[in-house]
Image: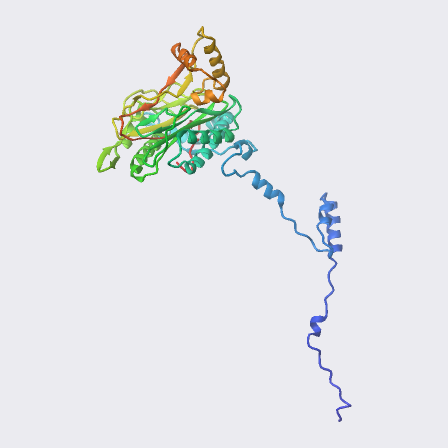
Amino acid sequence: MSSEEVKIEEPVVGEEKKQKKPKPNNKKIRQAEAAAKKAEGGDVEEAENNENENGDVKKKPNNKNKNKSKKNVQTDPPTKPISQLFPDGNFPEGEIVQYPVVKDKDDRTAQDRFTSEEKRALDRMHNDIYNELRQAAEAHRQTRQYMQKYIKPGMTMIEICEELENTARKLIGENGLEAGLAFPTGCSLNHCAAHYTPNAGDKTVLGYDDVCKIDFGTHIKGRIIDCAFTLTFNNKYDKLLEAVKDATNTGIREAGIDVRLCDIGAAIQEVMESYEIELDGKTYQVKSIRNLNGHSISPYRIHAGKTVPIVKGGDSTRMEENEFYAIETFGSTGRGLVHDDMDCSHYMKQFDTPFVPLRLQSSKQLLGTINKNFGTLAFCKRWLDRAGATKYQMALKDLCDKGVVEAYPPLCDIKGCYTAQYEHTIMLRPSCKEIVSRGTDY
Protein backbone atom coordinates (compact mmCIF):
# COMPACT_ATOMS: atom_id res chain seq x y z
CA MET A 1 0.00 0.00 0.00
CA SER A 2 1.43 3.29 -1.04
CA SER A 3 1.80 6.24 1.26
CA GLU A 4 -0.71 8.13 -0.85
CA GLU A 5 -3.50 5.63 -0.11
CA VAL A 6 -3.15 5.66 3.69
CA LYS A 7 -3.41 9.00 5.46
CA ILE A 8 -2.96 9.04 9.22
CA GLU A 9 -4.18 12.19 10.91
CA GLU A 10 -2.21 13.10 14.00
CA PRO A 11 -3.88 15.22 16.72
CA VAL A 12 -2.72 18.79 16.87
CA VAL A 13 -0.87 19.51 20.09
CA GLY A 14 -2.88 21.83 22.35
CA GLU A 15 -6.09 21.39 20.40
CA GLU A 16 -7.95 20.07 23.44
CA LYS A 17 -6.88 23.10 25.41
CA LYS A 18 -8.24 25.40 22.76
CA GLN A 19 -11.69 23.88 23.06
CA LYS A 20 -13.61 26.15 25.40
CA LYS A 21 -16.29 24.84 27.68
CA PRO A 22 -19.52 26.75 27.50
CA LYS A 23 -19.39 29.46 30.13
CA PRO A 24 -22.34 29.48 32.51
CA ASN A 25 -24.51 32.53 32.22
CA ASN A 26 -23.74 34.02 35.64
CA LYS A 27 -25.98 36.96 34.96
CA LYS A 28 -29.03 34.74 34.47
CA ILE A 29 -28.13 32.77 37.58
CA ARG A 30 -27.83 35.99 39.58
CA GLN A 31 -31.14 37.25 38.20
CA ALA A 32 -32.82 34.02 39.27
CA GLU A 33 -31.28 34.34 42.73
CA ALA A 34 -32.38 37.96 42.89
CA ALA A 35 -35.94 36.95 42.01
CA ALA A 36 -35.86 34.34 44.77
CA LYS A 37 -34.47 36.92 47.18
CA LYS A 38 -37.22 39.34 46.22
CA ALA A 39 -39.81 36.68 47.01
CA GLU A 40 -38.21 36.37 50.45
CA GLY A 41 -38.27 40.14 50.95
CA GLY A 42 -34.53 40.73 50.35
CA ASP A 43 -32.72 43.65 48.74
CA VAL A 44 -32.71 42.98 44.97
CA GLU A 45 -30.89 46.16 43.92
CA GLU A 46 -27.93 45.32 46.11
CA ALA A 47 -27.66 41.84 44.51
CA GLU A 48 -27.96 43.18 40.95
CA ASN A 49 -25.51 46.04 41.46
CA ASN A 50 -22.86 43.63 42.73
CA GLU A 51 -22.31 42.16 39.21
CA ASN A 52 -19.54 43.22 36.85
CA GLU A 53 -19.66 43.30 33.04
CA ASN A 54 -19.10 39.54 32.75
CA GLY A 55 -21.92 38.79 35.12
CA ASP A 56 -19.50 37.82 37.93
CA VAL A 57 -20.29 38.80 41.46
CA LYS A 58 -18.29 41.63 42.96
CA LYS A 59 -17.32 40.97 46.56
CA LYS A 60 -17.91 43.99 48.73
CA PRO A 61 -16.01 44.43 51.97
CA ASN A 62 -18.27 44.20 54.97
CA ASN A 63 -17.93 47.85 55.94
CA LYS A 64 -20.80 47.71 58.37
CA ASN A 65 -19.02 45.28 60.65
CA LYS A 66 -15.80 47.25 60.34
CA ASN A 67 -17.55 50.46 61.30
CA LYS A 68 -19.16 48.76 64.27
CA SER A 69 -15.85 47.43 65.54
CA LYS A 70 -14.19 50.83 65.08
CA LYS A 71 -17.03 52.56 66.85
CA ASN A 72 -16.66 50.44 69.96
CA VAL A 73 -12.87 50.64 70.30
CA GLN A 74 -11.18 53.23 72.48
CA THR A 75 -8.75 55.67 70.89
CA ASP A 76 -5.11 56.01 71.94
CA PRO A 77 -4.80 58.23 73.92
CA PRO A 78 -8.33 57.58 75.23
CA THR A 79 -10.89 60.24 74.31
CA LYS A 80 -14.21 58.42 73.75
CA PRO A 81 -16.73 58.53 76.59
CA ILE A 82 -17.43 55.14 78.14
CA SER A 83 -21.12 55.58 77.36
CA GLN A 84 -20.27 55.49 73.63
CA LEU A 85 -18.19 52.33 73.97
CA PHE A 86 -21.13 50.53 75.60
CA PRO A 87 -24.19 51.97 73.82
CA ASP A 88 -26.49 49.30 75.28
CA GLY A 89 -25.85 50.74 78.74
CA ASN A 90 -24.47 47.50 80.17
CA PHE A 91 -21.02 48.23 81.58
CA PRO A 92 -18.41 45.60 82.55
CA GLU A 93 -18.77 43.98 85.95
CA GLY A 94 -15.89 44.03 88.37
CA GLU A 95 -14.44 40.91 89.97
CA ILE A 96 -17.24 38.79 91.48
CA VAL A 97 -16.36 36.78 94.59
CA GLN A 98 -18.36 34.87 97.16
CA TYR A 99 -18.60 36.20 100.69
CA PRO A 100 -16.30 34.78 103.36
CA VAL A 101 -17.80 32.59 106.07
CA VAL A 102 -18.39 34.73 109.15
CA LYS A 103 -16.92 32.83 112.11
CA ASP A 104 -19.45 33.88 114.71
CA LYS A 105 -22.41 33.47 112.33
CA ASP A 106 -24.01 30.53 110.55
CA ASP A 107 -21.35 28.79 108.42
CA ARG A 108 -23.83 28.47 105.57
CA THR A 109 -24.45 32.21 105.27
CA ALA A 110 -22.08 32.84 102.35
CA GLN A 111 -23.26 29.85 100.33
CA ASP A 112 -26.93 30.62 100.92
CA ARG A 113 -26.53 34.22 99.83
CA PHE A 114 -24.91 33.22 96.57
CA THR A 115 -27.62 30.72 95.65
CA SER A 116 -30.73 32.36 97.13
CA GLU A 117 -33.34 33.43 94.58
CA GLU A 118 -34.50 36.14 96.98
CA LYS A 119 -31.00 37.66 97.13
CA ARG A 120 -30.65 37.55 93.37
CA ALA A 121 -34.01 39.33 93.04
CA LEU A 122 -32.70 42.07 95.36
CA ASP A 123 -29.62 42.30 93.14
CA ARG A 124 -31.78 42.94 90.10
CA MET A 125 -33.71 45.68 91.94
CA HIS A 126 -30.49 47.64 92.42
CA ASN A 127 -29.06 46.98 88.97
CA ASP A 128 -29.34 50.65 87.88
CA ILE A 129 -27.20 51.73 90.84
CA TYR A 130 -24.64 49.00 90.16
CA ASN A 131 -24.48 49.99 86.50
CA GLU A 132 -23.76 53.64 87.35
CA LEU A 133 -20.87 52.55 89.53
CA ARG A 134 -19.58 50.19 86.84
CA GLN A 135 -19.58 53.01 84.29
CA ALA A 136 -17.51 55.17 86.65
CA ALA A 137 -15.20 52.19 87.28
CA GLU A 138 -14.58 51.62 83.57
CA ALA A 139 -13.69 55.29 83.12
CA HIS A 140 -11.29 54.98 86.06
CA ARG A 141 -9.69 51.80 84.68
CA GLN A 142 -9.05 53.18 81.21
CA THR A 143 -7.74 56.49 82.58
CA ARG A 144 -5.31 54.96 85.04
CA GLN A 145 -4.01 52.36 82.57
CA TYR A 146 -3.26 55.15 80.12
CA MET A 147 -1.58 57.24 82.83
CA GLN A 148 0.60 54.33 83.94
CA LYS A 149 2.21 54.44 80.49
CA TYR A 150 2.16 58.24 80.25
CA ILE A 151 3.83 59.26 83.53
CA LYS A 152 7.61 59.55 83.34
CA PRO A 153 10.31 61.07 85.58
CA GLY A 154 11.00 64.69 84.73
CA MET A 155 7.33 65.67 84.36
CA THR A 156 5.90 68.31 86.66
CA MET A 157 3.16 67.21 89.03
CA ILE A 158 0.79 69.80 87.52
CA GLU A 159 1.40 68.37 84.05
CA ILE A 160 0.60 64.85 85.32
CA CYS A 161 -2.57 65.90 87.16
CA GLU A 162 -3.93 67.96 84.28
CA GLU A 163 -3.40 65.16 81.75
CA LEU A 164 -5.09 62.65 84.08
CA GLU A 165 -8.02 64.92 84.86
CA ASN A 166 -8.57 65.93 81.22
CA THR A 167 -8.58 62.26 80.19
CA ALA A 168 -10.93 61.22 82.99
CA ARG A 169 -13.34 64.08 82.20
CA LYS A 170 -13.61 62.90 78.59
CA LEU A 171 -14.14 59.24 79.49
CA ILE A 172 -16.70 59.89 82.23
CA GLY A 173 -18.56 62.33 79.96
CA GLU A 174 -18.37 65.24 82.42
CA ASN A 175 -21.78 66.81 82.90
CA GLY A 176 -22.01 69.14 85.91
CA LEU A 177 -22.92 67.21 89.05
CA GLU A 178 -24.39 64.33 87.02
CA ALA A 179 -21.01 62.92 85.99
CA GLY A 180 -17.39 63.91 86.53
CA LEU A 181 -14.44 63.72 88.87
CA ALA A 182 -15.24 62.83 92.48
CA PHE A 183 -12.21 64.49 94.10
CA PRO A 184 -8.86 66.05 93.12
CA THR A 185 -6.03 63.89 91.83
CA GLY A 186 -3.76 62.92 94.71
CA CYS A 187 -0.13 62.52 93.63
CA SER A 188 1.57 62.42 97.04
CA LEU A 189 5.32 61.79 96.99
CA ASN A 190 7.57 59.74 99.27
CA HIS A 191 6.90 60.55 102.97
CA CYS A 192 3.64 62.32 102.05
CA ALA A 193 0.96 59.62 102.10
CA ALA A 194 -2.22 61.42 100.99
CA HIS A 195 -4.09 64.63 100.09
CA TYR A 196 -1.37 66.33 98.06
CA THR A 197 -2.20 67.81 94.68
CA PRO A 198 -0.25 70.76 93.26
CA ASN A 199 -1.65 74.28 93.52
CA ALA A 200 -1.10 76.76 90.69
CA GLY A 201 2.57 77.68 90.43
CA ASP A 202 3.83 74.46 92.08
CA LYS A 203 7.00 73.49 90.21
CA THR A 204 7.53 70.08 91.83
CA VAL A 205 9.01 67.58 89.36
CA LEU A 206 8.65 63.79 89.55
CA GLY A 207 12.02 62.13 90.09
CA TYR A 208 13.31 58.65 89.24
CA ASP A 209 13.66 57.72 92.93
CA ASP A 210 10.25 59.06 93.98
CA VAL A 211 7.37 56.93 95.26
CA CYS A 212 4.17 58.49 93.88
CA LYS A 213 0.65 57.62 95.05
CA ILE A 214 -1.94 58.29 92.31
CA ASP A 215 -5.37 58.56 93.95
CA PHE A 216 -8.34 59.88 91.95
CA GLY A 217 -12.07 59.33 91.75
CA THR A 218 -14.85 59.30 89.16
CA HIS A 219 -18.61 59.36 89.66
CA ILE A 220 -21.92 58.94 87.86
CA LYS A 221 -24.86 60.60 89.66
CA GLY A 222 -22.82 60.71 92.85
CA ARG A 223 -21.90 57.00 92.77
CA ILE A 224 -18.20 57.30 93.50
CA ILE A 225 -15.26 55.12 92.51
CA ASP A 226 -12.36 55.70 94.92
CA CYS A 227 -9.31 53.83 93.68
CA ALA A 228 -5.55 54.34 93.97
CA PHE A 229 -2.19 52.81 93.06
CA THR A 230 1.49 53.53 93.68
CA LEU A 231 3.93 54.32 90.88
CA THR A 232 7.71 53.82 91.11
CA PHE A 233 10.52 53.70 88.57
CA ASN A 234 13.27 52.23 90.77
CA ASN A 235 12.70 48.55 91.54
CA LYS A 236 14.28 48.89 95.00
CA TYR A 237 10.79 49.80 96.26
CA ASP A 238 9.17 46.61 94.95
CA LYS A 239 8.78 45.00 98.38
CA LEU A 240 7.03 48.07 99.76
CA LEU A 241 4.53 48.01 96.91
CA GLU A 242 4.09 44.25 97.24
CA ALA A 243 3.33 44.59 100.96
CA VAL A 244 0.68 47.27 100.47
CA LYS A 245 -0.95 45.52 97.51
CA ASP A 246 -1.11 42.26 99.47
CA ALA A 247 -2.59 44.07 102.48
CA THR A 248 -5.27 45.73 100.33
CA ASN A 249 -6.21 42.41 98.72
CA THR A 250 -6.39 40.88 102.22
CA GLY A 251 -8.81 43.60 103.33
CA ILE A 252 -10.93 43.00 100.24
CA ARG A 253 -10.95 39.25 100.82
CA GLU A 254 -11.96 39.62 104.48
CA ALA A 255 -14.70 42.20 103.82
CA GLY A 256 -18.30 41.09 103.61
CA ILE A 257 -21.81 41.32 105.01
CA ASP A 258 -21.86 40.82 108.82
CA VAL A 259 -18.04 41.08 109.04
CA ARG A 260 -16.73 43.26 111.89
CA LEU A 261 -14.61 46.21 110.76
CA CYS A 262 -12.02 45.58 113.47
CA ASP A 263 -11.42 42.04 112.17
CA ILE A 264 -10.56 43.41 108.74
CA GLY A 265 -8.05 45.83 110.30
CA ALA A 266 -6.34 43.04 112.23
CA ALA A 267 -5.97 40.90 109.10
CA ILE A 268 -4.56 43.84 107.12
CA GLN A 269 -1.96 44.70 109.75
CA GLU A 270 -0.82 41.10 110.09
CA VAL A 271 -0.12 40.84 106.36
CA MET A 272 1.35 44.34 105.97
CA GLU A 273 3.82 44.03 108.83
CA SER A 274 5.04 40.59 107.75
CA TYR A 275 7.03 42.36 105.03
CA GLU A 276 10.48 43.94 105.21
CA ILE A 277 12.32 46.12 102.71
CA GLU A 278 16.02 46.85 102.35
CA LEU A 279 16.90 50.39 101.30
CA ASP A 280 20.50 51.57 100.99
CA GLY A 281 21.79 48.73 103.13
CA LYS A 282 19.26 49.21 105.94
CA THR A 283 16.27 46.95 106.62
CA TYR A 284 12.87 48.43 107.48
CA GLN A 285 9.67 46.74 108.56
CA VAL A 286 6.71 47.90 106.49
CA LYS A 287 4.22 49.42 108.94
CA SER A 288 0.51 50.09 108.53
CA ILE A 289 -0.18 53.81 108.94
CA ARG A 290 -2.51 53.52 111.91
CA ASN A 291 -4.34 56.84 111.58
CA LEU A 292 -5.34 56.27 107.94
CA ASN A 293 -8.16 53.93 106.94
CA GLY A 294 -10.72 52.82 104.41
CA HIS A 295 -14.31 54.07 104.56
CA SER A 296 -17.88 53.58 103.46
CA ILE A 297 -19.18 55.60 100.50
CA SER A 298 -22.64 56.98 99.80
CA PRO A 299 -24.02 59.20 96.99
CA TYR A 300 -22.03 62.47 96.76
CA ARG A 301 -20.36 61.59 100.07
CA ILE A 302 -16.87 60.13 99.91
CA HIS A 303 -16.66 59.42 103.67
CA ALA A 304 -20.09 58.11 104.64
CA GLY A 305 -19.55 57.39 108.33
CA LYS A 306 -18.01 53.92 108.73
CA THR A 307 -14.25 53.48 108.78
CA VAL A 308 -12.25 50.36 107.85
CA PRO A 309 -9.10 50.34 110.01
CA ILE A 310 -5.78 48.98 108.77
CA VAL A 311 -4.52 48.02 112.23
CA LYS A 312 -6.02 45.76 114.89
CA GLY A 313 -8.47 47.12 117.43
CA GLY A 314 -11.05 49.77 116.77
CA ASP A 315 -14.71 49.66 115.84
CA SER A 316 -16.61 46.37 116.06
CA THR A 317 -19.44 47.65 113.83
CA ARG A 318 -20.42 45.20 111.11
CA MET A 319 -20.62 45.72 107.36
CA GLU A 320 -24.14 45.55 105.95
CA GLU A 321 -25.88 44.51 102.77
CA ASN A 322 -25.81 46.99 99.86
CA GLU A 323 -23.09 49.14 101.38
CA PHE A 324 -20.21 50.48 99.30
CA TYR A 325 -16.66 50.66 100.67
CA ALA A 326 -13.25 51.96 99.69
CA ILE A 327 -10.77 49.38 100.96
CA GLU A 328 -7.42 51.16 101.08
CA THR A 329 -4.18 50.47 102.90
CA PHE A 330 -1.07 52.56 103.45
CA GLY A 331 2.37 51.15 104.25
CA SER A 332 5.33 53.14 105.52
CA THR A 333 9.03 52.68 106.25
CA GLY A 334 8.73 55.45 108.88
CA ARG A 335 6.73 55.65 112.13
CA GLY A 336 3.45 54.54 110.64
CA LEU A 337 1.74 57.74 111.78
CA VAL A 338 0.86 60.79 109.67
CA HIS A 339 0.32 64.45 110.52
CA ASP A 340 -0.80 67.60 108.64
CA ASP A 341 2.01 69.26 106.70
CA MET A 342 2.69 71.49 103.65
CA ASP A 343 0.30 73.84 101.83
CA CYS A 344 -3.32 72.76 101.78
CA SER A 345 -4.91 72.00 98.40
CA HIS A 346 -7.90 69.72 99.17
CA TYR A 347 -11.23 71.12 100.43
CA MET A 348 -14.76 69.79 100.76
CA LYS A 349 -18.08 71.29 101.74
CA GLN A 350 -19.51 69.71 104.87
CA PHE A 351 -22.21 67.21 103.93
CA ASP A 352 -24.72 68.01 106.67
CA THR A 353 -23.79 71.55 107.70
CA PRO A 354 -26.81 73.62 108.84
CA PHE A 355 -27.41 77.08 107.38
CA VAL A 356 -24.66 79.50 108.36
CA PRO A 357 -25.12 83.27 107.77
CA LEU A 358 -22.23 84.75 105.80
CA ARG A 359 -21.35 88.43 106.10
CA LEU A 360 -18.72 88.67 103.35
CA GLN A 361 -20.07 89.01 99.82
CA SER A 362 -16.97 87.23 98.49
CA SER A 363 -17.76 84.24 100.74
CA LYS A 364 -21.30 84.09 99.39
CA GLN A 365 -20.05 84.19 95.82
CA LEU A 366 -17.45 81.49 96.47
CA LEU A 367 -20.01 79.26 98.17
CA GLY A 368 -22.26 79.69 95.13
CA THR A 369 -19.39 78.55 92.87
CA ILE A 370 -18.74 75.54 95.12
CA ASN A 371 -22.42 74.55 95.21
CA LYS A 372 -22.75 74.82 91.43
CA ASN A 373 -19.58 72.97 90.44
CA PHE A 374 -18.81 70.55 93.28
CA GLY A 375 -21.72 70.27 95.70
CA THR A 376 -20.50 68.07 98.55
CA LEU A 377 -17.71 66.51 96.46
CA ALA A 378 -14.10 67.41 97.23
CA PHE A 379 -12.29 70.07 95.19
CA CYS A 380 -8.94 71.85 95.05
CA LYS A 381 -7.68 75.36 94.32
CA ARG A 382 -6.80 74.44 90.72
CA TRP A 383 -10.45 73.50 90.19
CA LEU A 384 -11.63 76.80 91.64
CA ASP A 385 -9.34 78.55 89.15
CA ARG A 386 -10.84 76.43 86.36
CA ALA A 387 -14.37 77.36 87.50
CA GLY A 388 -13.50 81.04 87.12
CA ALA A 389 -13.09 81.97 90.79
CA THR A 390 -10.56 84.75 91.49
CA LYS A 391 -9.10 86.30 94.64
CA TYR A 392 -10.84 83.70 96.78
CA GLN A 393 -8.20 83.02 99.46
CA MET A 394 -9.85 85.16 102.15
CA ALA A 395 -13.33 83.89 101.27
CA LEU A 396 -12.13 80.27 101.37
CA LYS A 397 -10.57 80.82 104.79
CA ASP A 398 -13.83 82.41 105.98
CA LEU A 399 -15.86 79.38 104.84
CA CYS A 400 -13.42 77.06 106.62
CA ASP A 401 -13.50 79.13 109.82
CA LYS A 402 -17.31 79.00 109.85
CA GLY A 403 -17.36 75.23 109.33
CA VAL A 404 -19.09 75.37 105.96
CA VAL A 405 -16.03 73.97 104.16
CA GLU A 406 -13.39 71.70 105.65
CA ALA A 407 -9.72 71.79 104.70
CA TYR A 408 -7.79 68.54 104.17
CA PRO A 409 -4.04 69.31 104.28
CA PRO A 410 -1.45 66.81 103.00
CA LEU A 411 -0.82 63.93 105.43
CA CYS A 412 2.86 63.11 105.98
CA ASP A 413 5.00 60.63 107.91
CA ILE A 414 8.56 61.56 108.99
CA LYS A 415 10.77 63.06 106.29
CA GLY A 416 13.09 60.61 104.58
CA CYS A 417 10.71 57.66 104.77
CA TYR A 418 8.60 56.20 101.97
CA THR A 419 4.89 55.46 101.87
CA ALA A 420 2.72 53.49 99.43
CA GLN A 421 -1.00 53.06 98.85
CA TYR A 422 -3.40 50.72 97.03
CA GLU A 423 -7.17 51.05 97.04
CA HIS A 424 -10.30 49.52 95.48
CA THR A 425 -14.04 50.20 95.69
CA ILE A 426 -16.26 47.23 96.52
CA MET A 427 -20.03 46.67 96.48
CA LEU A 428 -21.63 44.38 99.07
CA ARG A 429 -24.39 43.04 96.84
CA PRO A 430 -27.05 40.79 98.40
CA SER A 431 -25.79 37.74 96.50
CA CYS A 432 -22.05 38.38 96.18
CA LYS A 433 -19.20 40.84 96.66
CA GLU A 434 -18.14 42.82 93.59
CA ILE A 435 -14.70 44.46 93.45
CA VAL A 436 -16.04 46.96 90.98
CA SER A 437 -12.78 48.86 90.29
CA ARG A 438 -10.63 45.74 89.75
CA GLY A 439 -8.59 45.78 86.54
CA THR A 440 -5.87 43.83 84.78
CA ASP A 441 -3.29 46.20 86.28
CA TYR A 442 -4.12 45.58 89.97
Q: Specify the quadrant that holds the N terminus.
A: bottom right
Residue that appears at 44% across and 9% down: 354
Instruction: Residue 92: give x, y in percent of width and height.
Output: 49, 34
> How many discs mark residues in the rendered view?
0
Residue that appears at 53% across and 28% down: 173
Extreme residue in the bottom direction: 1
* Residue 397 left/right relative to 89: left
User: Which corner quadrant of the image does residue 187 belong to?
Assistant: top left
* Residue 288 at least partly seen: yes
Q: Specify the quadrant that holds the C terminus.
A: top left
Instruction: Residue 247: give x, y in percent of width and height.
Output: 32, 32
Residue that appears at 52% across and 26% down: 174
Decide which of 233, 331 is in the foreground and name it: 233
Instruction: Residue 22: give x, y in percent of width and height.
Output: 74, 64
Extreme residue in the left direction: 282
* Residue 418 left/right relative to 295: left
Instruction: Residue 294: give x, y in percent of width and height.
Output: 36, 24
Decide which of 229, 10 is in the foreground and name it: 229
* Residue 85 left/right relative to 291: right
Decide which of 286, 344 is in the foreground and name it: 344
Which of the colour schemes (rainbow, by chain, secondary structure, one colour) is used?
rainbow
* Residue 299 at least partly seen: no
In this picture, is 409 found above or below 32? above
